[in-house]
Image (cartoon, rainbow, N blue to C red):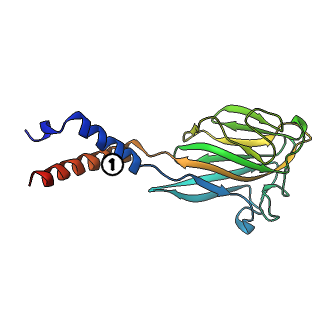
Amino acid sequence: MFFGEINMKKLFIGVVVLMGGMAYADLLYDFTDKGGTFDGQTSVVIPLTDGAISFNMTVSGSGGNLNSNLGNFGIGDDQIDGTSESITLTFSKPIDFKAIEFGSMVGGISDGANLTVAGSAIDLYTGVSGFDGTPDIYTPASPIRVNVGQSIVITGSSETSSFDLENMTFEAVPEPATMSLVGIGGLLALIVRRTKKQN
């Protein structure tokens, strides 16, 4: 039977090609210089597209209105001040969190951020392993999955913290149904290729 003639090596090659075709570019969202997008609001839904995946990111503020009017992004003004102000990000589809960049974060824990990703809390300030502080970019050792219903929360690490949120890098996660359809397409491509070689 024809299907039985497809050996494991060719099937493996097909899967590798398939997985390569499914890769999406990292999506970097810049929170700064957004004019009226956030100003005067405490919750904003942002439609995004990553590869073939469309989804929403909801940005919510606690302690004041979201503000991106001054070239930075913060609560009330252009900063996230202390532990009473926080920004929460949620997504309508799963994402892999890859990096986040802050601004105006100087000194030690008294001026740092607390980042909670999918329930795991991370204190960020100059001197913390994996966070230089110059520039203020945090990149986890491996991407952190944030599922629907989970969140990313940014607040101060102490009452004297003062910094702004600049951008975040993440990637949408293909749904199982999408992966299955692409897998079927890859298998059909192998069959068509083999048929052409035999003719």
Left or right of 6: which side holds 78?
Answer: right
Q: Tell me which amino acid carries mark 1.
A: Val
Secondary structure type for disc 1: helix
Residues 58 and 34: in front is 34
Residues 119 and 12: in front is 12
Q: Which residue extends farthest bottom?
A: 35
Which residue is depicted at the point 17% across and 39% down?
6
Crowd band around label 1 with a 10 angstrom C-alpha radius: few (<14), some (14–19), many (20+): some
Residue 115: % across, % down: 73, 38
Residues 32 and 139: in front is 139
Which residue is depicted at the point 23% across and 34% down?
8
Position above or below: 70 against 152 = below
| Residue 196 lies in quadrant | bottom left
Residue 60: % across, % down: 70, 51
Left or right of 110: which side holds 51?
Answer: left
Position above or below: 53 against 175 = below
* Total number of numbered discs in the rendering: 1
Position above or below: 32 against 137 = below
Residue indicated by mark 1: 182
Which residue is depicted at the point 66% across and 47% down?
89
Residue 135: % across, % down: 78, 48
Quarter containing the C terminus: bottom left
Residue 152: % across, % down: 67, 42
